[in-house]
Image: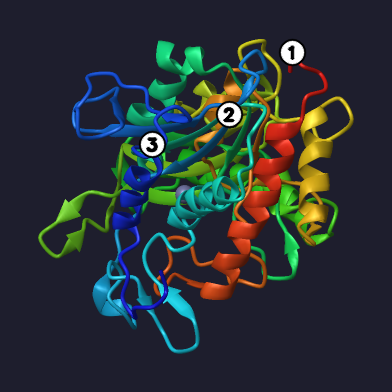
Amino acid sequence: MFNDRHFPLLPSFALLLLLSPPHPRHITTTTRRRNPNRPSLEFAPNKPTLLITWQGSNPSLSSLLFNSHLDSVPAEPSKWTHPPFSATLTPEGKIFARGAQDDKCIAIQYLEAIRNLKARNFVPTRTIHISFVPDEEIGGIDGADKFVKSNEFKDLDVGFVLDEGQASVNDEFRVFYADRSPWNLIIKARGVPGHGSRMYDNGAMENLMNSIEIINRFRDSQFDVVKAGKAANSEVISVNPVFLKAGIPSPTGFVMNMQPSEAEAGFDLRLPPTTDPELVKKRIAEEWAPAVRNMTHEIIEKGPLRDYMGRPLMTAIDDSNPWWSVFKQAIAAAGGKLAKPEILSSTTDARFMRQLGIPTFGFSPMTNTPILLHDHNEFLKDTVFLRGIEVYEHIIRALSSFEEAGSV
Ligand SMILES: [Zn+2]
């Protein structure tokens, strides 16, 4: 794969075809609205989900799912040292490509690991599925969300999922047992308009600025915990202002001697799964946008915080989760070190699997790598990429051979 300076990452999905036709008894594909030339499911028009299955020797055991997404965020080619969609391998061994870290690396590593295991005549006990889903970067509604709610997914009988994680800047692999859930909050203030020279109570701007002060104090209280080293960034509620909208436009800017009757601000909130969403809603309604100060608000929840049983959306990282010890042992067997499990600051497709109560870890085997997802000049070292294939061989071998707790 690395013989050529330029190799396309996405066309590596042609590997799917290498895997399936020669071994029809072991690798099968499931199809909905099937295009005979592609092993794809289509839960939304023209948004295929690719699904590959390696049949295990004991189909009565639940299966394993290795997920990644087909889409990536855009790139600004002029800000890159190499064209972002040509996957350039430099003489120092850096693969520059949009998606090199997020998360085409794992998509290809899954397949390469399976190819190596098949070459060594390894036979999995549990069935292994690999899914490539669309739309993760825009919320996954037509991707993983529809996939996990489908009958096709139910038929897979998935017992454990690995999805994407994030690069580690040191030599410890990172693993994520939960995501934070994003909320968009818009608060609006209304008040009596007035001359710019008058001081009076309950103006829209004054009401909005009071709220911003209160929200800022809350933000500081959360950030102080992080600064004091008592929690990671992803373990607190983050709230960041993202827009302010007020003022009466004039041909040269804004009318300067008039206090407006409406003002608005938008915030990005991220809630760890341990948060009680009802308490946050109460705080917003009573303190951040109280009706007594002529405030209204709107919350747009971008994902669930609880699973189907009403439990916080996180995967256990103790002995209650047998997959956790098998996963840990596999990393050790691969000669790797695992960092303390983390909550991911942002959000991935893993939340849809966790919502069904399926244990799911976020994991991308990238050590000693700067975190460049969504950034200019996203790259991955070839050695790190190749090492990742070996790590997945250990993981797939261990998880697919795990027979205890047969009903898990
Ligand atoms: Zn991603």
Q: Amino acid at mark 1?
A: Ser
Q: Residues within 10 Å of mark 2 (few under 14, many from 20)?
A: many
- Mark 2 and mark 1: span between their CA atoms? 43 Å
Q: Position of residue 24 (x, y in %)?
A: 39, 30
* Count of numbered badges drawn on the protein: 3
Q: Please report contact status of discs 2 and 1: CB closer than 8 Å, yes or no.
A: no
Q: Position of residue 1 (x, y in %)?
A: 40, 69
Q: Is residue 188 left or right of residue 213?
A: left
Q: Nearer the viewer, mark 2 or mark 1?
A: 1
- N-term mark: 2 or 3: 3
Q: Amino acid at mark 2?
A: Ile
118 and 39: which one is in front? 118
The numbered dot on residue 158 is: none
Q: Which residue is mark 3?
A: 133
Q: Which residue is mark 1?
A: 407
Q: Amino acid at mark 3?
A: Val
What residue do we see at 77% from left, 32% from top?
Answer: 323
Q: Is residue 209 left or right of residue 309?
A: left
Residue 363 visible (yes or no): yes
Instruction: From this view, report whether residue 404 is shown above or below residue 11.
Output: above
258 and 114: which one is in front? 114
- N-term mark: 2 or 1: 2
Q: Which residue is mark 2?
A: 284
Q: Which corner quadrant of the image does residue 8 belong to?
A: bottom left
